[in-house]
Amino acid sequence: MILMKSKLFQKLEQKQKLSPSQILTSKLLHLNQISLEQRIIKEIEQNPALEFEDLLPVEDEEAGDASDDFEGDELELDAEIDFEDDEVEGFERFDESSLSGEDVGSYVVPSKLSISDKLLSQFQDLNSGDIEIKIAREIIGNLDDGGYLAIDPIIISDKLQVDYNIVIKVLSKIRSLDPPGMGSRDLRECLLSQLEINDSDQLSYKIIDKFFDDFANRRYEKIQEALGVDMALIKDAMDAISVLNPKPGDGAGDFESQYIRPDAFIEKKGSKWIATLKEGSQFNLRISKSYMELLGHNDTKTSKFAKEKIGDAKMFMGALESRKNTMIKVIQSIIKFQSDYFESEGKKISPLILKQVAKDIKMDISTVSRSTKGKYIQLPWGLVELKAFFSESIDTGHGGVVSSTEIKNMIKEIICSEDKRNPLSDEKITSILSEDGYKIARRTVAKYREKIGILRAKMRREI
């Protein structure tokens, strides 16, 4: 038992421990361009020894030179730092959004405005009493991202000690607000709430109200037979239903606007594609001259404080440089593997996984993952997310491989050109791909179809 504990202790001792500078680099590497700029500003606000070069007169160049005289402990900052996922804690996570663009600069993602305030304001305009407003606040506070009520109304009734029927009454009022359907408990209720606004469309309402299961499973002939109307009228009703919003809360949440700015620029110079990271005054940092002068202060406490802050500033600047070097290495490796993509201006993409890039630049997969997650590059033809360059390879069955992204695009093209009244089954799509030289299993076709958000054939059929 003692021997086992000794071996375990030795094993733990042998595990490499990350230095503070490596942990800092790891965190900075995870940030996208805008988040990085915010982090730099925050660091400058918290560390008076760090400052922007452009904020001070050019003649104060001694401040930069003076940093060479800093006699504190040397900070070992590797140009490229590699690390495992489980060795670093406390990473900040950021939302990812796909976006393409033409101009260099900031790109705004459609923001989610404060729908809660909007709904409550509308509800108060209905001359509602205090009890109803209190119930409305509780309901609105329990809506999910799609706009649906996330809890049972009975819970609200019990919590507020109010009659259940009053809660249902308030819920009905909220569903009639803008956007209509907010606060619904299921899709049927959501669609009915929107159809109620248009009193003239009685057939659509009746179909959703009385034949929702048949509607959901596209059993149009059964609906026609039950209602005894012409199929043309059924089609008109379906067209009216198709423009309704099944998730009225989408695009109207309580989140701030998000902007996307390219982390790097890629352009062709001669015969080579070259990546450069976004540069600007925000990256031109230096050690404060006044803090360098404090190192020789008679007050030991002051001198010690200055030394500590200068050390932190140097470590931060070194971590920024390390992040830059790592990012460039990763992007240049992607360019090497995806040469066909760049030469075809985005039309061809090769299979590529993180492990290939990691092996190429002799870094860990987690490092490559952090370098690409949530990052965008500006190309001559638009803004592209780095993760778009990675996809698994598919064996074509005759010695070749193709990117899964390319297969998904093929499936999308095949379905887009199908007869909408007689949509293609997964088996038929598999057969078409096979005829084109791609030997893909039917279950793989089904998986990719679902991944690109396309319904199965039965659900795609139109009348």
Image (cartoon, rainbow, N blue to C red):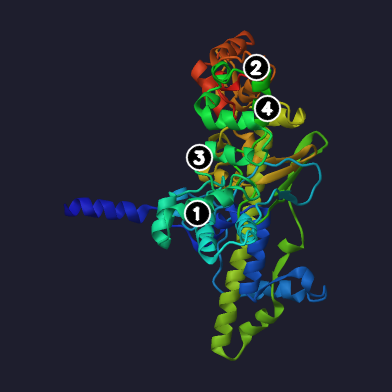
Residue at 77% across, 31% down: 345
Q: For mark 1, does the 10 Å Cα neighbourhood hold few (<14), some (14 to 19), or many (20 or more) residues?
A: some
Marks 2 and 3 close (CB-CB < 8 Å): no
Q: Camera-side residue: 304 or 98?
A: 98
Dot in front, 4 or 2:
2
Quarter assignment of residue 45: bottom right
**Is 11 left or right of 212, judged from the image as shown?**
left
Which of the two labelled residues, at mark 3 and mark 4, occupies the earlier sequence position?
A: 3
Residue at 48% across, 54% down: 167
* SS type, badge 1: loop
Residue bearing mark 4: 239
CA gap, disc 3 to disc 1? 14 Å
Residue 121 in sight = yes
Residue bearing mark 2: 231
Which of the two labelled residues, at mark 2 and mark 1, occupies the earlier sequence position?
A: 1
* SS type, badge 2: helix
Q: Camera-side residue: 19 or 154?
A: 154
Residue 16 in sight = no
Residue bearing mark 1: 142
Residue bearing mark 3: 186
Residue at 62% across, 62% down: 127
Dot in front, 2 or 1:
2
Above or below, comparing residue 174 to residue 319 in the picture = above
Which of the two labelled residues, at mark 3 and mark 1, occupies the earlier sequence position?
A: 1
Q: For mark 2, does the 10 Å Cα neighbourhood hold few (<14), some (14 to 19), or many (20 or more) residues?
A: some
What amino acid does circle 2 point to?
A: Met
Farthest residue in the bottom direction?
A: 298
Q: Position of residue 417 (x, y in %)?
A: 70, 17
* SS type, badge 4: helix
